[in-house]
Image (tube, grey):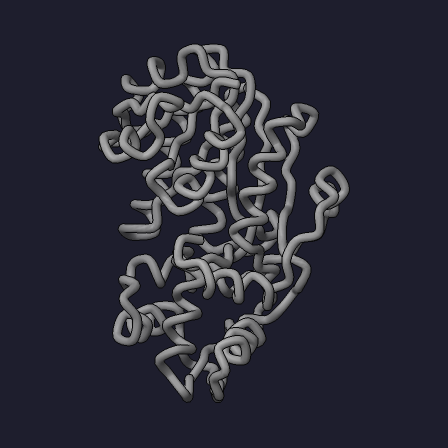
Amino acid sequence: MKILLTGATGYIGGLLLPQLLLKGHWIRTLARDPEKLKKQAGSAQEAVQGDLIKKETLPAALHGVDVAYYLVHSLTGSEREFAEQDRLAATNFSRAARETGLKRIIYLGGLGADQASLSPHLKSRHEVGEILRSSGVGVTEFRAAIVVGANSVSFRMIRYLVDRLPIMICPRWVKSLCQPIASSDVIRYLLAALGAPECSGKILEIGGSDVLSYREMMMEYARVRGLSRLLIPVPVLTPRLSSYWLDLVTPISSAISRALIEGLRNDVVCTDSTAREKFPFQPLSYRQAVAAALKNPDS
């Protein structure tokens, strides 16, 4: 199968690329700087230069492709800036997909109830899915919460906090519910979707086997690491203040941490079982996912 992979230099795309190649697929990657991707995959891959913001670069990238993975999103800049960037990128891709006759798009977005007061980040993730569907191309949209892997920025945020602070003053969002998923399980779903064209036009919610509050996630991580930690919730720490605080105690920039923290006010759990029914494998528990992330620095 001929596949276009966008976001191959990003976190999930970087994990997905070698798995696609192992399964014998011909892959074309789209990147601003494709040279390092050429070295990574050899002759089974064609790395082309392009940018989703520059619509003129997209038709050639999509030409002759059967399926495209859309794994691109922005977290930098202000709320308006990253939403506008995501909107423009998805619109350009949607138009190019329609004009080149692309058959399918597989997209990874974010969990969260559509009717809820979503954070700007989650709202943008949902909007991208809507824009891609407007192309008329069949879209399989997976929606996930926190991805647990060594290089996941949202999981790294948890790691830095728990590893570095024996006592944490935490805002109300630590009570919000989340259904984290192991990075390996996300990749399993993305790969399985290739063989399930009947999932075109569907939104599939994916998560691990546990639903936990963020407080429970941090405490469980501490237990896996053998650490003793105390979390003290307070009502006055706003997302903006939380992001500045994280900027002081973690290497994650306040621009990225604020976008993520804004999303933590929303419960992000699976409310539809279609994905589990269609792809009946048992996802890892949160504890198993944490242990795997700690063991494998490339996950």
Residue at image point 51% right, 21% down? 135
* Residue 215 showing in the rendered view: no
Compared across the picture, whether 199 is left or right of 31 comes to: right
Q: Is residue 237 above or below residue 115?
A: below
- Count of numbered badges drawn on the protein: 0
- In front here: 201 or 115? 201
- In front here: 105 or 39? 39
- In front here: 80 or 155? 155
Q: Where does the image place residue 40, in percent across and percent down from the top left? A: 32, 34
Q: Where does the image place residue 73, in percent across and percent down from the top left? A: 39, 42
Residue at image point 35% right, 18% down? 61
Q: Is residue 249 above or below residue 136?
A: below
- In front here: 190 or 92? 190
* Residue 199 showing in the rendered view: yes
Residue at image point 52% right, 54% down? 118
Compared across the picture, whether 136 is left or right of 234 comes to: right
Give the residue furthest to the right: 277
Residue at image point 40% right, 64% down? 156
Tell me which corner region of the image, top left, top right, bottom left or bottom right, holds residue 195. top right
Tell me which corner region of the image, top left, top right, bottom left or bottom right, holds residue 239. bottom left
Q: Is residue 16 above or below residue 268?
A: above
Q: Where does the image place residue 207, in percent across and percent down from the top left? A: 62, 53
Q: Where does the image place residue 274, in percent across and percent down from the top left? A: 73, 41
Q: Is residue 162 above or below residue 266?
A: below
